[in-house]
Image (tube, rainbow, N blue to C red):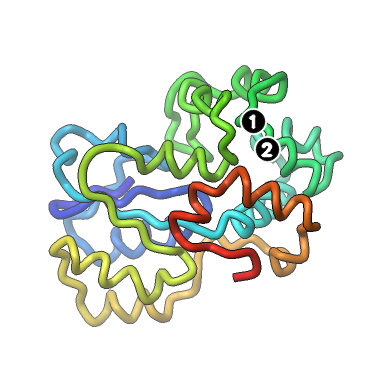
Amino acid sequence: MIVTGRFVFLHLHKSGGTFVNECLLRFLPDARQIGYHLPRSQIPPIYAHLPALGLVRNPWSYYVSWYAFQARRAQPNALFHIMSEAGARGFAGTLRNLLALGSGGALLDAILAALPGHYVNRGLNLPAPALEPIRGSGLGFYSFLYRHLYEGPGLMHIGRMERMRSELVPMLVSVGQSVGAAMRRYIAEEPPRNVSEHAEYASHYDASLRDLVAQRDALVIERHGYRFGD
């Protein structure tokens, strides 16, 4: 979470937030990072009246990026370890487990037992009490994160990560933030951050898994106009 005198930026997991965080901290003198992947509900009261900005990503792409990033780590996080059954399940099996969390069950119970009980400002930073409401929601994991991070009172501007280089400047201007030439060049030209290495995301899906994501993550897909293969 980045706070300024004009807006708050909320960092949705693996959705371009690292790039934006670095940009804001580099070019805006009053920008401060006060937490990592913290949701709107955790904005300090002194900043709660400010408009919030964020980014969203194609859910089919998100799951491939998340899996590729965790699979390459020497010590994947608890969510990946349990969902993948210590790496034995492969992408499709891991994702089916992840998408089943919205129905509750033993896997969700195992995840909740492994997660911390409070925000720790590192990694996914999703404590057990924050994940518990996924039970019975029917939501895909990414749509749950999206709702967890962004829902709340006040003005919210959400851009698409895939259009971030063209949408970020207008988003900033819309909340009264001036954007100088150097910052505009940075947004247009600076290489992306925290990129996962993987094949084109559509190649990881068969029809049934593609359709399962479409069903569970309809919240994000329909709200932001995503299509498989975009």
- In the displayed structure, would residue 148 be above or below residue 25? above
Dot 2: within a 10 Å radius of its alpha carbon, few (fewer than 14), some, or many (20 or more) residues?
A: many
Q: Which mark is residue 98?
A: 2
Going by the numbered disc 1, the residue's amino acid type is Leu
Q: Which mark is residue 101?
A: 1
Going by the numbered disc 2, the residue's amino acid type is Leu
Image quadrant of residue 179? bottom left
Residue 196 horizontal side relative to residue 94, left or right: left
Give x and y (percent) for residue 106: 72, 19
Question: Which residue occupies 40% across, 74% down?
Answer: 165
Q: Nearer the viewer, residue 25 or 71?
A: 71
Residue 181 horizontal side relative to residue 129, left or right: left
Question: Which residue occupies 64% across, 27% down?
Answer: 103
Give x and y (percent) for residue 83: 73, 34
Question: Which residue occupies 79% across, 48% down?
Answer: 92
Dot 1: within a 10 Å radius of its alpha carbon, few (fewer than 14), some, or many (20 or more) residues?
A: many
Please identify the quadrant where the C terminus is shown: bottom right
The count of marks equals 2
Give x and y (percent) for residue 171: 27, 65
- In the displayed structure, would residue 43 be above or below residue 92? above
Instruction: State yes or no: discs 2 and 1 in contact (Cβ < 8 Å).
Output: yes
Question: Which residue occupies 28% across, 72% down?
Answer: 169
Q: Secondary structure at mark 2?
A: helix
Image quadrant of residue 96? top right
- In the displayed structure, would residue 223 be above or below residue 145? below
Q: Secondary structure at mark 1?
A: helix
Give x and y (percent) for residue 86: 80, 35
